[in-house]
Image: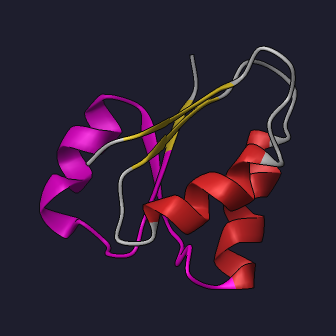
Amino acid sequence: LEVVTFDLEDHVRHHDLLRRLDVDARRADLSTPAGVEAVAAEVRREGLTVVLCDGAHKAAAFDALSRALKPGDLILAHD
């Protein structure tokens, strides 16, 4: 299982925990085309993808990333 997370901020205080859990933490701004493309590129990779939109721009992220989903992938939003 590969876990990749994207966030606006670099959560330095959580680096040790994320490393221990083998989570690949990256920065991306989903309010920009470059940020959306960075995440969409991961979504388009082979294999099952679960996307959880939980940021300030979750409606726009949900809309943009849903276009990158493959059959069987899931997309969720949290408020």
In the rendering, at what x and y percent does residue 10 appear?
A: 31, 72
Q: In this view, does 5 lie above or below 55?
A: above
Q: Considering depth in this image, is 18 or 76 the residue closer to the camera?
A: 76
Quadrant of the rendered image containing residue 77: top left
- Residue 64 lies, in percent from the top left, at 72, 60
Residue drawn at (80%, 19%) of the image: 47
Q: Identify the residue at image location x=56%, y=81%.
A: 31
- 20 or 62: nearer the viewer: 62
Compared with 38, 63 (above or below) is above
Which residue is pictured at 72% across the width and 22% down the height?
A: 73
Q: In this view, does 48 lie above or below 50?
A: above
**Residue 45 appears left or right of 78:** right
- Which stretch is magenta? 5-32
**Is residue 31 covered in magenta?**
yes
Is 41 in the magenta? no
Q: Residue at x 58, y 67 (%)?
A: 60
Q: Is residue 6 left or right of residue 36?
A: left
Rendering coords of residue 26 (x, y %): 49, 62
Viewed as shown, does residue 39 lie left or right of 70? left
User: Where the N terminus falls, by quadrant?
Assistant: top right
Q: How many labels does the image show?
A: 0
Question: How far across and how far down the image is residue 69, in percent?
Answer: 80, 36
Q: Which residue lies furthest to the bottom in this view?
A: 32
